Image (tube, rainbow, N blue to C red):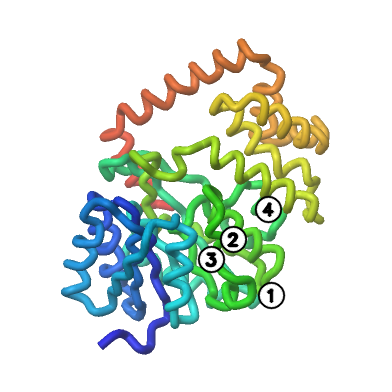
Amino acid sequence: MRNQSALVTVITPAYNVEPWIGEAIDSVLQQSEGRFEYIVVDDGSTDATADVVRARAATDDRIRLVQVPNGGSGAARNVALEQARAPFVAFLDGDDRWGPQFLRCQLDAIAAAPPEVGVSFCHTRVMTEGGQVVGLRWQPAGPCDADRILVENNPPHHGSSLLIRRSCFDELGFFDPGMRSAVDFEMWLRIATRSSTPLFWGVRRYQVDMRLMRTGCISADRGARFEALDRLLAQYAPKMNRLPPGLAYLRPAVFAYRDGFDELACRWAGEALTAGTTELARSVWGQSLLAWHKAGPAGRERLRAARTGTRSALYGGATVASRAVRHLGRLV
């Protein structure tokens, strides 16, 4: 019999993640907080993803496999949300994994936070396609309002790091299935600007491992990401009330310069510069933007080449980096 007193509905949208979905599911089943229902939506996979899920479901009746035609991660999550019954929702991508205290940590955090907090999120470690942890993501702790979410360019970073009150979806609806990218960010901005519990709360605990830039992942399509982000910034940056709206464009402009989208980066940099060069020069991100913007086309090519070499050296030394990062992640 399924858990009738579930505190959390865990949702995994899964598309062609056969090599990793078993590890993701096992990380849910190993949670110290066991009061959950688990809905895995196979989004029209053409590999054996559904077979892996089905085998796990045969041994634990908290797992429910739902199979739908391919419609994207937003549509797959919506299918599960329609069936969700618990007061909290947590999403885990099919190629990520949680630490065993993830749910307990997030539930404790949201219980202790102010009542206007609708979402808590933990810190993230980055792993290679093969599962080696090679980096830590910097994420804020404490309260994040809409202004901070925009300026820090989606502090939760990805959908696997959050615990969300079900009431947020009841108020605002579900994910936008028509978005090609940034579907998470759009939903978080809706919550932060329109929900009755709009605050996000960062928890300084590393409880999720994100598989970065694996083969076939949506986030690898930088063009689609930037296109979606351009629309979101145009919609939400003018609504900022604590900080200069131009700061919402700061980090995206740096990312676009790094990835070679110079035309878009220059336009975003122009928006960021409305905050004033003095304001930008106060932060590392602002200094980086000013350097990229002033470098010109030839200078930016040299900056990209240097950055590529540095990243290759870092990920080429994955074994050493993995040991160091695992140690740091335990200490923080």
Where's residue 104, x and y in %?
40, 72
Mark closest to the chain's N terminus, 1 or 2: 2
Where's residue 59, x and y in %?
16, 74
Q: CA distance from mark 1 to mark 4?
A: 18 Å
Q: CA distance from mark 3 to mark 2?
A: 14 Å
Q: Is residue 324 visible?
A: no
Residue at 53% x, 59% y is 177
For label 1, the SS is loop
Q: Which mark is residue 120?
A: 3
For label 2, the SS is helix
**Splitting the image into 4 quarters, where does residue 91 fall?**
bottom left
Look at discs 1 and 3 and give the one toward the viewer.
1
> Amino acid type of disc 3?
Ser
Q: Which mark is residue 196?
A: 1
> Amino acid type of disc 2?
Met
Give above or below for 229 relative to 64: above
Q: Are marks 1 and 4 in contact (CB under 8 Å)?
A: no
For label 3, the SS is strand
**Splitting the image into 4 quarters, where does residue 175 fall?**
bottom right
Q: Which mark is residue 187?
A: 2
Q: Are marks 1 and 3 in contact (CB under 8 Å)?
A: no
Q: CA distance from mark 3 to mark 4?
A: 14 Å
Q: Nearer the viewer, residue 72 or 61?
A: 72
Look at discs 4 and 2 and give the one toward the viewer.
2
